[in-house]
Image: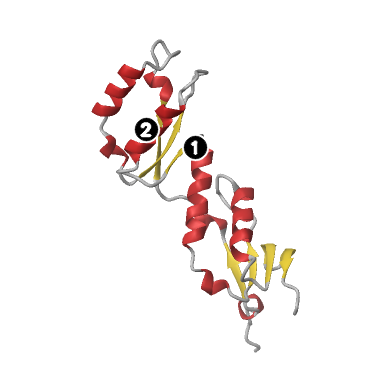
Amino acid sequence: MTEIVNRVKESGLISIDLADYKPRIEITSIDFADLLWQRLVLKEKDFRAWAKDHDWSQYASKAVFVHCSEDAIIPTWAFMLICSQLQSHTNDYVVGSEKDLEKELIRKNILKDDISKYIDGRIIIKGCSDIAAPEFAMVELVRFLQPVAKSIMYGEPCSTVPVFKRMRS
């Protein structure tokens, strides 16, 4: 009886699952629409009073996206003021959509990875994953890995599409 050999495992291929970079932090939002007078205008005095009295500690250990769901013009300083307050409680915040925030969190998770384990590696980035912005994540992974990888492929070990191959020197 012959022993079954896992040739994929022995090939030295490094498989990366995008799900490993999926944000694991709770996501919440601050919507300027809730702070507008008649859902139209931001009154500076009322807004500053809200910012002063708001419980900013509720955002500790959370990721926050700051946006306005109403069609209103919000002055730039108002975004700056909110983000200035968030800074003491979380480093994970963006002005934009929830998807913008998820992209930023994905980028941060990729950059936290140990690049040394990919040096001269033959890397496969798995294509199927439950992640908010798979194209973004794949491009960020290529940007991260290409300086050190021997090759980068997309797909599964049994069926890959070449993306990058370092030229021999």
Say which label, 2 or 1, has the lower sequence index.
2
Residue 88 in the figure: left or right of residue 168: left
Q: Secondary structure at mark 1?
A: helix
Whether residue 98 appears in this view of the structure is yes
In front: mark 2 or mark 1?
A: 2
Task: Indicate the position of residue 120 as horizontal and vertical percent values.
Answer: 63, 76
Task: Indicate the position of residue 116 as horizontal and vertical percent values.
Answer: 52, 73
On screen, residue 133 above or below 83: below
Residue at 45%, 24% (x, y): give it: 75
Q: Secondary structure at mark 2?
A: helix
Circle on res. 113: none
Identity, as a three-letter code, of the amino acid under mark 2? Ile
Task: Indicate the position of residue 19 as horizontal and vertical percent values.
Answer: 53, 55
Identity, as a three-letter code, of the amino acid under mark 1? Glu
Task: Indicate the position of residue 53 as horizontal and vertical percent values.
Answer: 24, 27
Residue 93 in the figure: left or right of residue 47: right
**Label 2 neighbour load within 10 Å: few <14, some 14-19, many 20+:** some
Q: Nearer the viewer, residue 92 or 1?
A: 92
Circle on res. 98: 1
**Label 1 neighbour load within 10 Å: few <14, some 14-19, many 20+:** many
Q: Nearer the viewer, residue 95 or 129?
A: 95
Residue 30 in the figure: left or right of residue 111: left
Residue at 50%, 34% (x, y): give it: 96
Residue at 26%, 28% (x, y): give it: 52
Place residue 132 in its image quadrant.
Answer: top right
Which residue in the protein does label 2 denote? 82
